Amino acid sequence: MSPRDKTASRDSRSSTKTARKSTVLDIGRPVTAAASKPRPATHLNVEAPTIAKPRITPGKNTKSVFIKTYGCQMNVYDSERMADVLAPIGYAAVDKPDDADLVILNTCHIREKAAEKVYSELGRIRQHKERNKPDMKVAVAGCVAQAEGAEIKRRAPVVDMVLGPQTYHKLPEMIARVSRETGDVLETEFDTIEKFDALPAGRQAKGYSAFLTVQEGCDKFCTFCVVPYTRGAEVSRPVEQIVAEARSLASQGVREITLIGQNVDAYHADGPDGAEWGLGELIRHVAKIGGIDRLRFTTSHPRDMDDGLIETLSTEPKLMPYLHLPIQAGSDRVLHAMNRGHSYAHYRDLIAKVRAARPDIALSGDFIVGFPGETDEDFEATMNCVREIGYASSFSFKYSTRPGTPGATLPHQVPEAVKSERLKRLQDLLYTQQREWNESLIGKTLDVLVEGHAKEPGRLFGRSPYLTGTHFDGPDDLIGQIVPVTITSAGVNSLVGALV
Ligand code: SF4
């Protein structure tokens, strides 16, 4: 057993059981149009929508809201906060749109044809509303709302409200305006601080693992990405606000918190000691909160990952040995065209430092193949990067244009067939590495945070320190606990084990 294994194991003995069941927002596995193989079991998903499940059964005097979430963990967090904003005005979350008084599509703009997918979903909602629920209200939130703005209401008159990611705190006011049939129902401002100031201080936890947004927006302007246009500039939340939210989650039984941000490593704010704090200081501070046994952070950027944060990986035992550090491409020429602001050598050096600080780290990466102008030689550089670094999990996609981004107008777009062939080769390599990583855990005892039931009767499901989904037999009263599980078999996406 490694020193890290011992550290992880000791949590289980101090576990406190809570009565609540597992999470109500489960982010599925990543899916891409080109992916023909199983994808990594991970919390990051940019395609498959998730549904906010009911928190309470709507009573006689309550209304119901159905929230469908597309995209990354930032959207999952935002959907939870929208539910928090709506609860005081009588809206209970339901898991089907059928009888909902309010339907919210919390959209993502990261994948191809995102807006078109939203419009076809709105077509289905319109039919349902006309046939069955004429008084239903419909809102479009998230990055497609921000990007499309008033165009959404023009193309889909069924939509009553359009709200960008920084305006969710205005939902009650917008609903009132819609109900009175007066005023503007388009909110796409960019005031992140106002949003967080105005969101309810209390937050209803759902399960034992929670996302907590500490930073939003991006100043990097990668030439393939819409996020800087839809989420705005980088903004960090104040330390005390984050700590209050983390305490509230801990008091409700949450054991694991993932600090999230579009560029979470860019976090910086005034600390209680008067000094400027980065993510490392914030992590160490949040780690002091009683009841929180595990911390994670995502998504990192190679430009912002500093020595202080790397040192925290080695010194903070509550920080789990998992790092998602996207590189996108292994060729410096392509990295430059992508405006990533770092070279492959810089990335490789960072990984070396991370591994020196935390030898058992499970590395995860993002890759884009077929960026405009990518040659066979450039692609081979990406393959070499994967061979050299070695990944425990990954996300890989074919490049597709995003209207309004510089990449969309670059010459030398790569033919679709070439992109598909490169993606297949890359994924063959990545999934082989992923399987080998998982198989290397067979025989080890890992601490698993039990999130709920597995699909198989009598089985439980949880997450290892490496974020891998882990299945094992055990009684229901382990749900919410961190328990030692000896791994007996491994697949590409998950582990199977036996309770110790
Ligand atoms: S760093 Fe690049 S890929 Fe990441 S959110 Fe910013 S612009 Fe998009």
Image (spheres, rainbow, N blue to C red):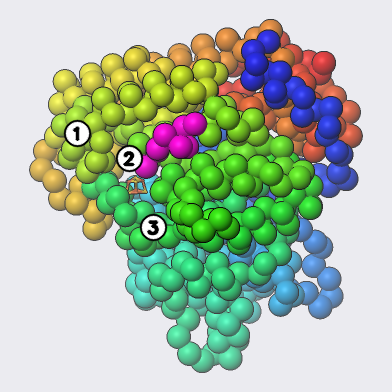
The mark found on residue 303 in the picture is: 2
At horizontal 40% and vertical 70% (from top left) the residue drawn is 190
Query: Observer-nearest residue: 60 or 283?
Result: 283
Q: Nearer the viewer, mark 3 or mark 1?
A: 3
Farthest residue, direction left: 411
Q: Is residue 104 left or right of residue 482?
A: left
Q: Secondary structure at mark 1?
A: helix
Task: Report if residue 302 is visible in the image.
Answer: yes
Q: Amino acid at mark 3?
A: Glu
What amino acid is at disc 1?
Val
Which region of the structure is painted magenta?
A: 304-311
Q: Quadrant of residue 482?
A: top right
Give the numbered dot on residue 234.
Answer: 3
Q: Secondary structure at mark 3?
A: loop
- The correct choice, above or below, for 6 with respect to 46 in the image is above
Helix, strand or loop at disc 2?
loop
**Which quadrant: the C terminus?**
top right
Query: What residue does disc 1 label?
Result: 334
Q: Is residue 35 magenta-colored?
A: no
Q: Is 117 placed left or right of 81 in the picture? A: left
Was residue 309 drawn as part of the magenta stretch in this picture? Answer: yes
Judge: label 1 CB < 8 Å from ligand 1. Answer: no
